[in-house]
Amino acid sequence: MLEKKILSTIKKYELIKNGDNIVVGVSGGPDSMALLNSLINIRKNSNLKFDIAVAHINHMIRAEADEETKYVQNFCNENNIECFIKKEKVEEIAKRDKIGTEEAGRKVRYSFFDEVLKQVNANKIATAHNANDNAETVLMNIIRGAGTSGLKGIEPIRENKYIRSLIECTRTEIEEYCEEQNLQPKIDKSNMENIYTRNKIRNLLIPYIKENFNPNIISALNKLSELAANENSFIENKVQESYKQVLISEMLGNNELESKNKIILDLKKFNKLDLVIKNRLMLYTIGRVLGTSKNIEKVHIEDLVKLCSNNIGNKYLTPNKNIKVMVNQGKVHFIKQ
């Protein structure tokens, strides 16, 4: 049943096409083992033909990590799947870069996935995010005060590269599948420790909501996520249309290290736009100049829109050290610093 559901998700979002070459991120836990096993079976039993390679990273934090690495290697050998292994001292990286262990682990994982992608000439990376992960992400974004775009949670496909075939499957369904298939995945006991925000949401908040408010909270949050994603897609299309209408000039480098990135918008046309579009357009333009709009917060966008509406010449703001937004002679200049 789970494989039928996964195949349905693949077709619904066009996650996999014939001829794709996919790097599957596999930790050895229930989610990633269900993902890998289901993809092997779908490839065998459906009309979809694609290649699979496995990328496994050992974070060198827990004593059981080497055992998990061996388990993934053995499973891949038994199923004739090419397996790439990397060991990284994630805690040391976190200290060196002054970031959290979770963030360091994520950076290391995705960097390695990209490494393997190039090595095997793949075009997609499959991760094992499921419906529970998505619900947790939506709740986390609400708690952090994210905008409406945060309600879309984890997208089934991102940048036409990262695919999440399990995104409509619950953790319970995945665990039942692992038992049925006798996969015997490894359990990461640190997931039960309520140190990180996500673990607190997973182990404390969601069970509390289930017991006291809504037993179907996972399903409810996933419905909200899908609605938000559809509406966000509609708004993004409108933003891109508006961008073309207000654009005066765009000078963008070919890579993120290019320092001459600059976009100029027509101030008068910008000020005539609806406030929702103005806010999103600010974010979109900054994203085009910098390659990312990460760390640009709601307060920054509000200040920039206000700067434009005041229409006072030679005034500027720096939402962060990488970009300067200046109003001058009826134009809005976005300049990479």
Image (tube, rainbow, N blue to C red):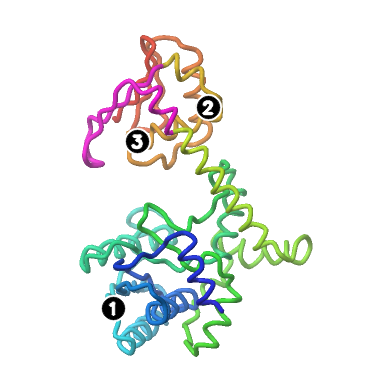
The quarter in which the N terminus is drawn is bottom right
**How far across and how far down the image is residue 182, in percent?**
50, 90
Lateral position of residue 168 relative to residue 320, left or right: right
Look at the picture and state if 284 lies above or below 89.
Answer: above
Write the residue at 44% across / 61% down. 102
Residue type highlighted by circle 1: Cys
Query: Which one is nearer the viewer's eye here, 198 or 92?
Result: 198
Q: Which residues are magenta?
A: 240-266
Kindly give the residue lying farthest to the right in the view shown.
Answer: 212
Q: Is residue 41 above or below residue 289?
A: below
Residues tagged 3 and 1 counted as in contact (Cβ below 8 A)? no
Is label 3 in a helix, a strand or a loop?
helix
Q: Which residue is nearer to you in this view: 63 or 41?
A: 41
Label 2 Cα crowd, 10 Å radius (few <14 / some 14-19 / many 20+): some
Residue name at image x 34 percent, y 85 percent: 70
**Residue placed under numbered mark 3 in the picture:** 288
Q: Which residue is mark 2?
A: 302
Check residue 83 in the rendering and tell me which mark sits there, or answer none. Answer: 1
Of labels 1 and 2, earlier in sequence is 1
Query: Looking at the image, which residue is at 52% across and 75% down?
Result: 4
Which residue is at the far front?
47
Comes first in the chain, label 3 or label 1: 1
Q: Which image quadrant is residue 92 in?
A: bottom left
Q: Nearer the viewer, mark 3 or mark 2?
A: 3
* Residue 177 belongs to the span the image colors magenta: no
Marks 3/2: CA–CA distance: 19 Å
Q: Name the quadrant containing residue 323.
A: top left
Q: Secondary structure at mark 1?
A: strand
Task: State the mark number for residue 191.
Answer: none
Amino acid at pointer 3? Arg
Residue 169 x %, y % = 56, 69
